[in-house]
Image (tube, rainbow, N blue to C red):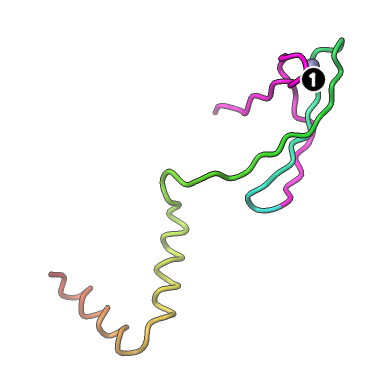
Amino acid sequence: MRVMKIICPECGVKATIKKTNRKHEQLSDIYCYCSDVECGHTFVMNVSFSHTLSPSAKSKNRIVKDLISWLTPDQKQMALDLLNNPA
Ligand SMILES: [Zn+2]
């Protein structure tokens, strides 16, 4: 697995992640320190969710469950008929 590479913004040397503070499900603060002892820079980077490339199988199942819960009895019957007799 590829790990995230953090570069010290002061000197350009590889930095090490000390801890991660998950502020929100889509946003984390990454506490880093420069691996160059002569630099010694410690800093915080933000990592945020950008966008989905391929949807999660888990969210697909949730969408189906949510959709079924929103349907009226007539619509549920219609969905059942469609599933039983696909066009
Ligand atoms: Zn540095």
Residue 64 falls in which quadrant of the image? bottom left
Label 1 CB-ligand 1 distance < 8 A = yes
Q: Is residue 19 above or below residue 86?
A: above
Q: Is residue 82 above or below residue 74?
A: above
Q: Is residue 24 above or below residue 1?
A: below
Q: Is residue 76 above or below residue 3?
A: below
Q: Position of residue 70 (x, y in %)?
A: 42, 80
Which residue is labeled 1 in the image? Answer: 34
Q: Position of residue 71 (x, y in %)?
A: 38, 82
Q: Nearer the viewer, residue 57 or 53?
A: 53
Looking at this view, name the residue that lies furthest to the top. 38
Callout 1: 10 Å neighbours few (<14), some, many (20+)? many
Residue 86 falls in which quadrant of the image? bottom left
Q: In which quadrant of this rendering is ligand 1 seen?
A: top right
The residue type indicated by label 1 comes to: Cys
- Please give the name of the residue rendered at 71% of the width and 15% of the height, measured from the top-left corner: 12
Residue 20 falls in which quadrant of the image? top right
Residue range highlighted in magenta: 1-23
- Per the image, label 1 sits on a secondary structure element best described as strand
Q: Is residue 80 left or right of residue 14?
A: left
Count of numbered tags: 1
Q: Position of residue 43 (x, y in %)?
A: 81, 30
